[in-house]
Amino acid sequence: MADVLPVTVFAASDRTRVSLRDGTQWRSSDGRVYHLLTAWAAVGQAGKGQRLLHLGLDVSQKEALLATYRHMLAVVLGVGLVCAACAASVVARRGMRPLAEITLAAQRITVTQLHECIGPVRWPKELTALATTFDAMLTRLEDSFTRLSQFSADLAHELRTPINNLMGEAEVALARPRTPEEYHQLLGSSLEEYAKLARMIDSLLFLARAESPETHIVCTLFDARKELEVLQDFYDAMAEEHEVAIRCQEQALVYADPLLFRCALSNLLSNALQYTPRGGTVTLSVTQADDYTLIVRVRDTGIGIAPEHLPKIFDRFYRVDPARSQRRPGMGLGLALVKSIMALHGGTITVESVPPQGTTITLRFPLPAEVRR
């Protein structure tokens, strides 16, 4: 043992009890590994003698086995990391392929191809909601572009008519010398066209402001019946000319902007008088609903509106067949203005019509909790 493990390689030991785990590792010059332990032991009769024991265990094979395991573990981990990275790259590319296809599909969509859609059928369930939402957005955009295009065409047509009238009258007047009375008549006719253009521009500006999220209105609580009576007095002359009776019924408080409330009812009353034949009646009524909503109804005994026109009558510049009107049709902005006014108040507008019995338009103004009684 002295040739393999010199005494100097053993650590000093006190006389306390030791265990096999207290030993040390030592590597010889030939590369072998030993586990060394130094301990005192009782010997002789009755254990009265003391001897210092040096124990050495050759653990080279175990260390070599552990070293082999460590090497193999490092190789396996390295190969595993490389394989995992490659597999992750393949899985990620395959998983991102639907997104790339959705991107290509979105790039193919232009202003003239908004009708195309991505479709949620062939996509993974994680992307189905995205495709569905994207298609819904395209549908809204297509509807907005269609409405905008139609609005531009209608606006151009509405502006062209009075301008053509003005140009035609001016050309006729300049064709030969005119008397002062003829020029006076020409200026009066032109002034009517200018007034129509001014009203149209004011209505369009109001509609644009009403659609802005920054638009705020000042609402107050007032007697709706008094406002209806004011409108009745204002339109009495027109009603007498058309031989139509105006009636006001019920009484209730409304929480709204007084000017906008009057504007909305004025448009509805004007339309009702236009499309009610002689001897008819226009009834204005206000009632308080159980859900703290004020209901304003404008009911006429006119010619009514066909069912196919009801969903479109609130569109700008939309007119039902002019043959239904016995008088000059308006600009087609009145009901659009009323709808915008109700949107500003957080209310609703509905229409019920039975040709040729008449039409009923219902406005619902909500009453906030802080002003309820």
Image (cartoon, grey):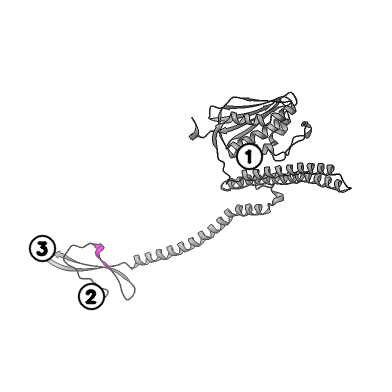
Residue that carries the numbered disc 2 in the rendered image: 8
Depth order, front residue of 161/20: 161
- State the image coordinates of residue 178 (x, y, percent, origin top left): 87, 45
74 within the magenta span:
no
Specify the label residue 45 is tagged with: 3
Expressed as whole percent of the image width and height from the top left, the position of residue 164 reads 81, 46
Q: Nearer the viewer, mark 1 or mark 3?
A: 1
Q: Residue at x 57, y 33 (%)?
A: 365
| Distance between the alpha carbons at the discs numbered 1 and 3 | 116 Å
Residue 24 falls inside the magenta stretch: yes
Q: Nearer the viewer, residue 9 or 304?
A: 304
The reply to whether residue 339 is in sight is yes
Q: Which tag, 1 or 2, sits closer to the chain's start? A: 2
Residue 303 in sight in this render: no
- Amino acid type of disc 2? Thr
Query: Amino acid under label 1?
Result: Ser
Asked if residue 196 lies left or right of residue 50, the reply is right
As displayed, is residue 125 above or below residue 314? below
The residue identified by callout 1 is: 340
User: Hey, which quadrant is residue 94 in on the image?
Assistant: bottom right
Instruction: Say which quarter of the image contains residue 302.
Output: top right
- Does label 2 or label 3 sit earlier along the sequence? 2
- Which type of secondary structure does the marked residue at label 1 adopt? helix
Q: Which element is circle 3 on?
A: helix
Distance between mark 1 and mark 2 Cα atoms? 103 Å
Depth check, front residue: 235 or 138: 235
Residues shaded magenta: 8-27
Kindly identify the amino acid type of the residue bearing the numbered disc 3.
Answer: Gln
